[in-house]
Image (spheres, helix red, strand yellow):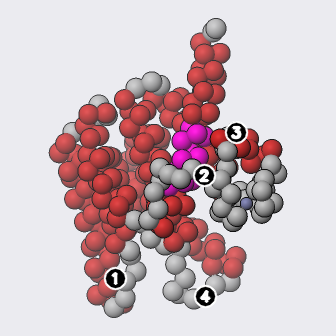
Amino acid sequence: MTMAENRIFYGFFAFIFGTCIGSFLNVCIYRIPENRSIISPGSSCPDCHGSIPFYLNIPILSYVCLWGRCKFCNHSISIRYPFVEALTGAFAVLLFFKFALTFALIYWFFFICVLIIISFIDIDHQIIPDCISIPGIFAFTSSFYFLPEMTVMQSFMGILSGGGILYAVAAFYYLVKKQEGMGGGDIKLLAMIGAATGIKGVFFTVFAGSLLGTVAGISTMFYMRISDTKFRIPFGPFLSIGAILYIFFGDGLIQWYFGTISR
Ligand SMILES: [Zn+2]
């Protein structure tokens, strides 16, 4: 095989692998907020609870073959399931193309999987479970082992700045408005992102996440004509998108930004 054919072959393999992991992420997203085991029992229909045999549990394909319906009760199954599978597969491919077969690939894939779980739980329940973010802070401090540019000190500073920035914002908001605006979950999430990306990553993530969150918030308000100021869109997904943008484009964008303003 030529080099290009090789890349396509491994890229395809990465996608299949990613969708299988994505299938497991769906289980985590669905069960962790309910405090249920993510190991057993196996997958079942959310409606009739009929257990899904392994040959009907193939990522994306099963959904397409069954036209998005449960084989037993014909209840429609959320498009979210194949979407999360495809999303995880896509990130596996993109990471493989950026990092090839390195320790960085393993680290960032695991990191993005955790961000996907956190984001969808935040969308569904407006919470970020401590049982993911707190162990995450410790686990991702291992970045010095997987990433050539990271040190323990940088992780430590990332955790402090990540936790600190949002804590300061939350405390200020509370002083001014006398109500909670920023969830404690967001604070721990950004501390976790800091463990993986260091101070530079934290600032990039807050900047990109706030920008995207503001744009999305304003357009949702216009589109849905919501004037209620208590209307809240979860911040977790935007912080996650910010962190993922940093993994792929962070250094390039930071250089471009400072290159533009110093000219
Ligand atoms: Zn069913």
Taking the magenta stretch, the answer to whether it contains residue 22 is: yes
CA separation in Å, label 3 and label 4: 48 Å
**Residue under the point 66% across and 61% down:** 49
Residue occupied by mark 2: 43
Q: Main secondary structure of the magenta part?
A: helix
CA separation in Å, label 3 and label 2: 12 Å
Name the one closer to the observer, 64 or 110.
Answer: 64
Residue occupied by mark 4: 227
Looking at marks 2 and 4 on the same chain, the residue that comes earlier in the sequence is marked by 2
Residue 76, percent across and down? 77, 61
Looking at marks 3 and 2 on the same chain, the residue that comes earlier in the sequence is marked by 2
Question: Considering only vertical position in the picture, is 39 above or below 95?
Answer: below
CA separation in Å, label 4 and label 1: 20 Å
Looking at marks 3 and 1 on the same chain, the residue that comes earlier in the sequence is marked by 3
Q: Which mark is residue 55?
A: 3
Magenta-highlighted residues? 18-28
Disc nearest the viewer among 1 and 2: 2
Question: Considering only vertical position in the picture, is 103 above or below 109?
Answer: above
Looking at marks 1 and 2 on the same chain, the residue that comes earlier in the sequence is marked by 2
How packed mark 2 is, by other alpha carbons closer than 10 Å (few <14, some 14-19, many 20 or more), is some
Question: Considering only vertical position in the picture, is 30 above or below 224?
Answer: above
List the single residue furthest toward the top. 1
Residue occupied by mark 1: 173
Amino acid identity at mark 1: Tyr
Residue 151, percent across and down? 21, 39
Amino acid identity at mark 2: Ser
Residue 28, percent across and down? 50, 55
Q: Quadrant of the N terminus?
A: top right
